[in-house]
Amino acid sequence: MVRTRKNRYTPERDGNALKKNGGGDAAATRKSGKSPVERKMDTVVVKKGPGGKQRSKKGGFTDHNRSWLTPKSSSKNAKKKEREEEEIESSSEEEEEEEESSDVGSSESSEEEGDGVSHGMGNDESSDDEEEEGEEDSDDDDDAEEEDTRVQKQDLFDSSAESSEEEEDSDEDSDEDSDEEEMDIEREARELDEAERLEREEAEEEAAFMARDDAMETNIQDVEVITLPSGQQIESEMLAAPDLAMVQRRVRDIVRVLDDFKRLREPGRSRQDYISQLKSDICTYYGYNDFMVETMLSLFTVAEALELIEACEVPRPVTIRVNTLKSRRRELAASLINRGVNLDPIGPWSKVGLVVYDSQVPIGATPEYMAGHYMLQGASSFLPVMTLAPQEGEKVVDMAAAPGGKTTYLAALMRNTGTLIANEINVDRLKSLKANIQRMGVNNAIICNYDGRQLPKVLGEFSADRVLLDAPCSGTGVISKDPSVKSSKSQDEIWKCAHLQKQLLLSAIDLVDAKSKTGGYVTYSTCSMMVEENENVIQYALRKRNVKVVPCGLDFGRPGFIRYREFRFHPSIQESRRFYPHAHNLDGFFVCKLKKVSNDVINKPVDQDSQEEESGEEEEQQDIQRESFKSHILEDAVAHSQQKKRKKSKTKELIRENEHNDEKQEIHSSQSQPPHADEVQKKKKRVRGIYKKALQELQAEMEEKKNAKPKKTKRSKKAKKQ
């Protein structure tokens, strides 16, 4: 007797189970009276969707409702699903063939078993009981297997139903598979072609846009030609109050014309006409004098000079420096933010700077400020200290220390070790210097009050490791702080500042010891943009002392000038750095670092090949200085002559008053004259004669001086040094 299996179904063995249990469907049919398809449709599971409506499983779809109940797949997943459906179709066809073969085999085996049972009943009655027991067991097994095979048959039914609909599209699917293979191979090429096509389209659109802009500009130029004002218009503008809006518009128009002069200029007008009109308009609108405007136009292009002028009208942002002797930047920022201060780090180039945008409390009156946790200091003032880079245990001299921002920064970098000498020539500024040094907790500083030119005699030559010289200057880089610089500076004043700066720089170099193990450096800085105060002073030091220019160690800033007008400087001066308001959002600043090579004081040229050129440049500079000195002498002479004229006018008025009084006295005396009146009259006449002679002599002397040519006088050594 053959027994059927009990509950042996697993998903991995679904194919074999369907093949071997072909008789299970027959037994289930006998028991239920329904075909496998009908029993499969009875087992469709119904569930409720998210909207409360009933929805069927995928296995419950029929040929009638399958097309509209099937969710639409996206275009990206369509091809994957088509492949899966083809695989299911092929597998379902194979399984159907196997099922047919298994059904045939099972029918034959059942007939053989039936014959054997009939023969056995005639021979043995016990076999009947065993067959009845076997049939009962088979019925139980069939009921258990019905549940196991139900889900499997559902899947097969679904696959067969789907395959019946997709048989017609099998050829199209095979074509799509071949297309997919080709697309996989040619995908990169197609992507490249698409990218090139997009680039071409973008380039064409941009070219068309630029062409439209050019056409618009040409149309505007054809309609509105930029013309300079005539002489009558200039005279009328000078008589009336200036129209600032019109002047500003004309300045911008002239700048645009000068950028493309050949195409935009007015016929019959030269470039000099436009520049002269631009200078006068800038002086009118921004309040500069002719010297300052001419200097800025010589330093920069016209457009950049206008950017610089506009940037100088805006104040620089408020910055503070953290005192690392008492606090850290993160802790200080947190405490200030809690007090209502909006701030940010100053930039990657500084680890101690903070920019303050706005504040609900006074920045210079917070408890942190009073405790010395930070210092109100311009960002440009960080640069010379960073360039000098003092080390611990060194002897450092700050030749112009007030109000103490750079001095306290030096002490913080030195960590209160070594010796720091803070010198200030102005007695009134010593109070602020002393207060800031005490507030910031500096313990290694010595304050002194000397002229910087005398420090080598006071402190001793070669007595310092490093020297910082933030020289007094014209202040042309801090116009936003002091607008009076616009109209108060002249070429003579610039040369005076440069003369003082040269003397201070030589004194700073004499203070430094070239044999110092860690030092031997001098940092020279000014808050000026003038070449005469910056590169020209460094060139003078290179000729007079054994020094060389070394890199500043700053990652930003523009290099120093090598050529400017008639000046020619050493190529190493490119290592210096310039900072501008419009380019770096800092005050106009110049920084240069010098390394002392030898303690010998010699007047050596920087380059032997260019000795003749330098000598010619020295003579030119000396001529310029002589001319400026002569102009000062002439100014003094004019002032002296004016004083003399005033004195003469006063003496004449006194004489007239005396004569008037004498006439009155004569009239009075004629009425009643004493016996000695004649003698008094004679004395008065003598005095008048003396006064007249003196006046005549003075007038003759003044006329002789005016007519006489000025004689060349030899200047003494002291005067030359001064």
Image (cartoon, grey):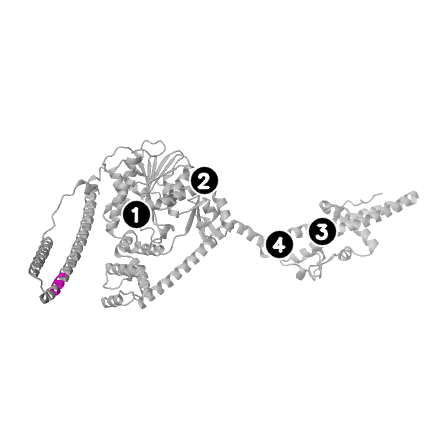
Query: Which numbered disc, 3 or 1, marks the residue that appears first in the sequence?
Result: 3
Query: Which numbered disc, 4 or 1, marks the residue that appears first in the sequence?
Result: 4
The amino acid marked with disc number 3 is: Glu
> What is the distance, in whole Å, between disc 3 and disc 2 at their CAs?
90 Å
Residue 189 at what x, y percent from top left?
Answer: 48, 51
Marks 3 and 1: which is nearer the front? Answer: 1
Helix, strand or loop status at disc 4: helix
Query: Which range is magenta?
Result: 658-664
> Per the image, is 661 magenta?
yes
Which quadrant is the N terminus positioned in? top right
Write down the residue under mark 2.
325
Q: Is residue 642 above or below residue 606?
A: below
Q: Residue at x 22, y 38 (%)?
A: 609
Write down the residue under mark 4.
82
Write down the residue under mark 1.
473
Which secondary structure dominates the residues rendered in magenta?
Answer: helix
> What is the distance, in whole Å, between disc 4 and disc 3 at their CAs?
21 Å
**Does residue 148 appear to the left or right of 233 in the view shown?**
right
The amino acid marked with disc number 4 is: Glu
